[in-house]
Image (cartoon, grey):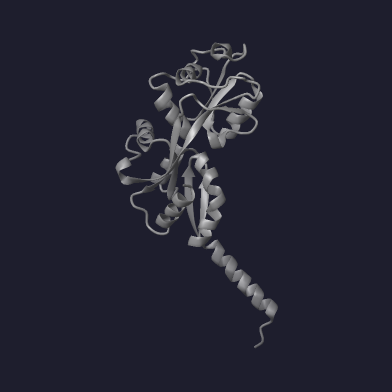
Amino acid sequence: MKISHVSLSLSVAFALALSASAQTVLRFAGATTLEKAIKPIAGAIGQTHKVTIELVPNGAGRGLEDLVAGKAQVAMLAGSLTNFAAQINGKKPGTIDPEKLKVHPLFEMGAVVIVHPSNPVASLTHEQIRGLFSGKITNWKEVGGPDTPVLIVISAPSDGVRSVVTEKIMADTAYAATARMFQTSPEMNKVVAQVPGAVAMLSEKNAAPEVRAIKPAQPILVPYSLISIGEPTEPIKSIIAEIQTRLK
């Protein structure tokens, strides 16, 4: 029996397609900043280890919940595992056991205050940041800015930057009841870019060109890491190690 070159080519293509579709999918869920950092290298790393790396930027807290629920193999964390575990367990006792999780450190990145491009304020102390987000400071003229009311924009509790700001800046001070909460950094950037008195806090990487980023007078560093359940097996172990090397 003769097999034409066309038929053979189609058979090979079909086999390759089946092989690709059967490739293992590893889900990384969590911090948006890490999704942006890993995305450019995910394809090459996945190809090396013959897996598909799926990145889900749904917030650090949700990433942890997905990990322990078996919906993700790796959590992308911004902030402290201890703090997030306490926050999640406060709502759903026993959800997170930090002792069963392994932290794989990546890097630290500064958090910035984002304001409307027309806002001339050049620097803010931790005390001023706390005053702005608590509602104690209600007008930008109180910190050397224009005579403009402050509109507070905050991220969801599952956000890593908010977790660090809450711990290191707000401490026992509550966010203002008038604060407007958004789920994603693009939404926060959009509001701040449109409203002259708006203020929010994001990681340096998530601040859009349409807003102005102010570095706090004293740096606010957010730790970023990958989290696995215990010591990961292959190929997850090698993939995490490669990401750590590439993001140094």
State the image quarter where residue 242 is shown: bottom left
Relative horizontal placement of residue 96, taking residue 54 as reference (left or right) = left
- Is residue 233 shown left or right of residue 15? left
Report x, y in % for residue 241. 42, 53
Q: In this view, does 194 lie to the left or right of 88?
A: right
Is 243 or 121 nearer to us in this picture? 121
Q: Which residue occupies the foreground of this view, 64 or 201?
A: 201
Work out whether residue 22 or residue 133 is closer to the camera in this orientation and state it.
133
- Rendered location of residue 24, percent (x, y): 48, 59
Q: In this view, does 188 lie above or below 237?
A: above
**Residue 169: quadrant of the picture:** top left
Can residue 50 be seen here? The reply is no
Identify the residue at horizontal 46%, vertical 19% (top origin): 130
Q: Among all residues in the image, which is located at the extreme bottom?
A: 1
In the displayed structure, would residue 210 be above or below residue 235? above
Query: How many numbered callouts?
Result: 0
Looking at the image, the residue that sits furthest to the left is 99
Q: Picture coordinates of residue 114 (x, y %)?
A: 57, 27
> Which of the image's four quarters has the N terminus?
bottom right
Observer able to see residue 43: yes
- Tell me the residue at 57%/14% (across/down): 144
Residue 244: percent from the left, percent from the top? 44, 49
